[in-house]
Image (cartoon, rainbow, N blue to C red):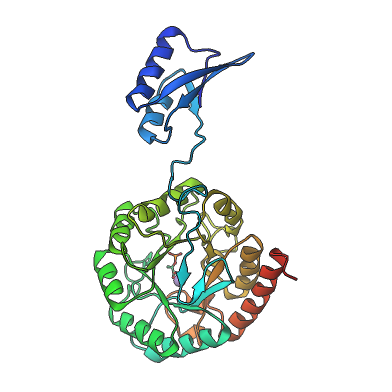
Amino acid sequence: MIIPHVSKLNDEQLKEVTDIVGAFGCRVQPIIGAEQTIYAIIGDERNDDMVTKLEGLPYINRVDRIQSPHKLMDARSSLASHRVAIGSVTLGTELFVCAGPCTIDPKNPNLTIETAHAVKEAGAHALRGGVWKPRTNPYSYQGDAKALLILMEASRQTGLPVDTEVMDEEHLKLAIEAGVNCLQVGARNALNYALLRQIGQAITGRDTAVLLKRSIHSGPVQEFIAAAEYIVQLGNPNVILCPRGTQPGLDGYRNHPDESIVPLLKERTWAPVVVDPSHSVGKASYVASAAMAAVAYGADGLCIECNVAPSQGIGDDPKQAVSPAVLKDIITKAKAVWKIRRGEN
Ligand code: PEP
Ligand code: MN
């Protein structure tokens, strides 16, 4: 729908608009109102280039699209009945929990192995753990491919599927070869379209899933959905949306907790949403409330940093990892919230 600044386009303006939409296989249909005439675009109005050209005209106020530009992620798309499974859990059928250390310390494999057993015992369905880390400070620990062996050993011992972040093609190749079940796209790379495409291509024809974090900077909901569309359009629809808090942070929290985005994502897309409350709040003692809020808002699952000895961990663990006992308590309460939300009490 084209909404001009003027009350009605003159003949010259109407011709210009008609020519632009015509070049994209569409036509315009005026809708005459008492005060203003607006112009419906008849045809496929999703083309961004067409909309940009129209919005660039000085006499056009804006173009409102009825159809989503994200045709595959859209809640009305042919993928709407697709369900994403991680290990034995089909997301949406029960509360899914992924937990584990922020970062796998290659010098202390036992810490990850013990944590893996403990998160399983606490009720988690999948194990997370950073092999390669996107660190703000270039002198901080950056990760080590050796940690991938530890993650896969932990998976073998516990039977838990695993999630780890990949930041480039080499990580992607190694992670897929090792059998990583879920590739994480971090908040810093969430809009790295070249990486999103590489991941989409690499997982085509596999049952690998992608946990796509929301960009660290608070962007529009559509921006987040469009990032997922980059992956899904290459053929594998196993994408999970992961809000994790945005910058600027809320004073006192590491980020601005954004679990309230869940209903919007649920309305606009068919994709499962797994919230990461750990990075949202950045402090172990706040994680439980953020987790409950996320489930109350409609999340299908949680991704939580947990370590048997947070103070011995590296990366975020000393500050934001919860103990396995706290994880167990969070899972019990979050399941109760899940039931209340679904009217199952
Ligand atoms: C992480 O999961 O440890 C991580 C770095 O996450 P994010 O990209 O959300 O900061
Ligand atoms: Mn972390």
The reply to whether residue 254 is visible in this rendering is no
Q: Residue at x 50, y 54 (%)?
A: 80
Q: Quadrant of the C terminus?
A: bottom right
Residue drawn 51% across the image and 78% down it: 125
Q: Quadrant of residue 203?
A: bottom left
**Quarter where residue 176 is shown:** bottom left
Ligand 2 located in image quadrant: bottom left
Q: Is residue 250 above or below residue 308?
A: above
- In the image, taking residue 55 as reference, residue 76 lies left or right, namely right
In the shown orientation, is residue 199 left or right of residue 254? left
- Residue nearer the viewer, 45 or 10: 45
Q: Give x and y (percent) for residue 233.
A: 36, 52
In the rendered image, the vertical position of residue 70 relative to residue 273, given as above or below: above
Name the foreground residue: 215 vs 299.
299
Q: Could you tell whether 225 is left or right of 106 in the image?
A: right
Q: Residue furthest right?
A: 345
Nearer to us in this view, 207 or 247: 207
Taking the spot 43% from the left edge, 8% from the top edge, the residue there is 11
* Relative to 324, residue 209 above or below: above
Q: In the rendering, at what x and y percent does residue 212 appear? A: 43, 61
Q: Which residue occupies 54% across, 64% down?
A: 280
Q: Give the percent coordinates (x, y) of residue 312.
A: 46, 86
**Looking at the image, how many numbered discs can be counted on the residues?**
0
Residue 320 on image: x %, y %: 53, 74
Residue 158 appears in view: yes
Residue sitting at the far top: 11
